[in-house]
Amino acid sequence: SRSRSMFGQSVLGLLGAGDLDEDSWEEIEDTLLMADLGATTASEIIERLRTEVAARGVRTPDQARALLREVLMDALATTQSRSVQALPHGDPADGGKPAVVLVVGVNGTGKTTTTGKLARVLVADGRSVLLGAADTFRAAAVEQLGTWGERVGAEVIRGEEGADPASVAFESVQRGADSGVDAVLVDTAGRLHTKTGLMDELGKVKRVVDKRAQVDEVLLVLDATTGQNGLAQARVFADVVDVTGIVLTKLDGTAKGGIVFQVQRELGVPVKLVGLGEGADDLAPFEPEAFVDALLG
Amino acid sequence: MFDTLSDRLTSVLKNLRGKGRLSEADIDATAREIRIALLEADVALPVVRGFISGVKERAKGTEVSQALNPAQQVIKIVNEELIGILGGEKRDLALAKKPPTVIMLAGLQGSGKTTLAGKLAKWLAGQGHTPMLVACDLQRPNAVTQLQVVGERAGSPVFAPEPGNGVGDPVDVARRGVAEAERAQHDIVIVDTAGRLGVDEEMMQQASDIRDAVNPHEILFVVDAMIGQDAVSTAEAFRDGVGFNGVVLTKLDGDARGGAALSVRQVTGEPIMFASNGEKIEDFDVFHPDRMASRILGMGDMLTLIEQA
Ligand SMILES: Nc1nc2c(ncn2[C@@H]2O[C@H](COP(=O)(O)OP(=O)(O)OP(=O)(O)O)[C@@H](O)[C@H]2O)c(=O)[nH]1
Ligand SMILES: Nc1nc2c(ncn2[C@@H]2O[C@H](COP(=O)(O)OP(=O)(O)OP(=O)(O)O)[C@@H](O)[C@H]2O)c(=O)[nH]1
Ligand SMILES: [Mg+2]
Ligand SMILES: [Mg+2]
């Protein structure tokens, strides 16, 4: 899916042909719309591109392709670091504190899987990791994280089904600090941003953890297949728990994940990781270039 | 910025009197607004195009009525067209003449299949059926455990001979599940399968192998109402890879407009049968095309207004 499609080639062929007719512009807009950038963002990108094409006298398809890429890359640019803050504060064996990461998002986006994969990355780097199973709601969610713990070699703190997620989260950071692990990753239950009761509960999880430790990252997991609703999700989660990074999952499918243009710009929160499969090693840093290339087909 | 299609159309058509027909220019301006509204509702672009040309066609011939303002009138047309597509050829679950009826669930990862399995079981049991669930997701960590919990909540037995987490053959489990249902006289079998991507050929082959092993009467494509433009390629991939004859829309309890409903219906022609609207086992309903239409347009009240006019 990373190769150039016929569609993408024809767009850029036309772009390179010199004077562009409306059909060609429409084709470019289509590419952006089909990637879930949304109507407003797509037309903003087109406007930018029109200006640039005129200003720079684009001649060859290669120049044109480069220009469109440039405009898209620019729209994704951020001054913030894209690296995940998951390293301990000082040496935990010597009074230092573990890094604390909270994983949040709507139902079924890939939170538990991402938590497992992130643990894998850290463990592979020689770090010790503790997982907190603060999804005490969904059927077998605790067992699912438990399996990930076994798979990657991380201890899992479990609450009873129906237990207060905030207390499980608290216990996890407490235990992590006591046993001197490098990082504590807390998985939370999926919840729709429209459910105020559940969002309040999430806010409480964060506040309770805040009391015991510094939360280094709050990762919002967005599913790449999500359309325009992704922005609404991000707004509310950012409001309730101060999201510090986006994880864009399921990019191994045909979805392009273009909603992150709006999310990044409006919230100023960078995309940090991408999910590329269901396996333990299918997690990668977000690379704008690769992302934009895949988007252009 | 206008929030609803109604606001947008009102502003575009504000100079129109309640007489005569919409001009070519009015219709074009209207079409632009409808296009944006549908795109914002995540209706897939190719579907938007086809839909709009249909609406334009109708709008051309229509007299601007006295009772409705022109904006209302266009919305009425859009709404009727939407309901026409979403609701065309409604049907109930196809029950087998000779039980058990086999219902297979398929869809992308995390779309809500396992949860739906429980909801369907509970709903069917409430109608006097004796459903049994079959755990054929042997892939995702603890999918089997999840189905067992869900089955318990639904009060339906779960056939789960393999532990999953990579162990066991889903095709074999499906086959044995149906045999077990025959033996224990369950009149409905609900087969939960692993989530899979349209582009994953191996997993898609597995789905079609499960299908061939149990010849389901119903294959339901389970799709998340929050899905965006990918709805079309995914629906096509499942149609071509495993085939389905019904659609279930999930997570409708959120605020996604759910344009995918229109996309999937239009592209595959298969009916949307059920709506899943919450995490609890009773959060389930048959699909209501009229509600979905006003949801996509984002204007329930507007439509009530029109009905009353
Ligand atoms: N193809 C693909 N599948 C993924 C990816 N990440 C997660 N999944 C799958 O998506 C499904 C849901 O993943 P989970 O990790 O359970 O999602 P969750 O957000 O924890 O779900 P809830 O806790 O129920 O809200 C599972 O089948 C995962 O295997 C990814 O990057 N690519
Ligand atoms: N809010 C809401 N959540 C839902 C709905 N249906 C399912 N979910 C949630 O979505 C998440 C994924 O649901 P599952 O039933 O595990 O989805 P699945 O398709 O079986 O996932 P995989 O087996 O991993 O492919 C869970 O957190 C469910 O509780 C719904 O209608 N509304
Ligand atoms: Mg989870
Ligand atoms: Mg499942």
Image: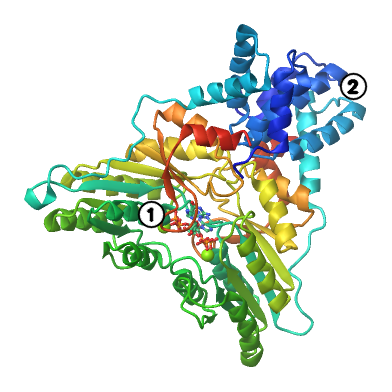
Relative to B175, is A221 above or below? Answer: above
Element under disc 1 = helix
Q: Position of residue B133 (x, y in %)?
A: 57, 77
Q: Is residue B186 above or below residue A10?
A: below
Amino acid bearing label 1: Lys
Identify residue for label 2.
Answer: B21
Residue extending farthest left: A94
Residue B278 percent coordinates (x, y): 52, 57
The residue at label 1 has a CB less than 8 Å from ligand 1: yes
Q: Is mark 2 within 8 Å of ligand 2?
A: no
* Residue in the foreground of this view, choosing between B71 and A45: A45
Chain assignment, label 2? B
Viewport quadrant of the C terminus of chain A? top right
> In the picture provided, is A100 more to the left or to the right than A52?
left
Q: Residue at x 28, y 65 (%)?
A: A158
Q: Chain of mark 1?
A: A
Residue at image location 81% in from the left, 19% down from the top: B26
Above or below: residue A75 compared with residue B257: above
Q: Secondary structure at mark 2?
A: loop
**Total tally of numbered discs in the picture:** 2
- The residue indicated by pointer 1 is A117
Residue depicted at 65% across the width and 89% down the height = B185
Residue that extends furthest to the bottom in the rendered view of this protein: B183
Q: Amino acid at mark 2?
A: Arg
State whether discs 1 and 2 lie on one chain. no
Say if residue B26 shows up in the picture: yes
Q: Position of residue A55 (x, y in %)?
A: 61, 7
Of residue B285 and residue A257, the one placed in the foreground of this image is: A257
Judge from the rendering whether residue A22 lies leftward or rightward of residue B41; answer left or right: right
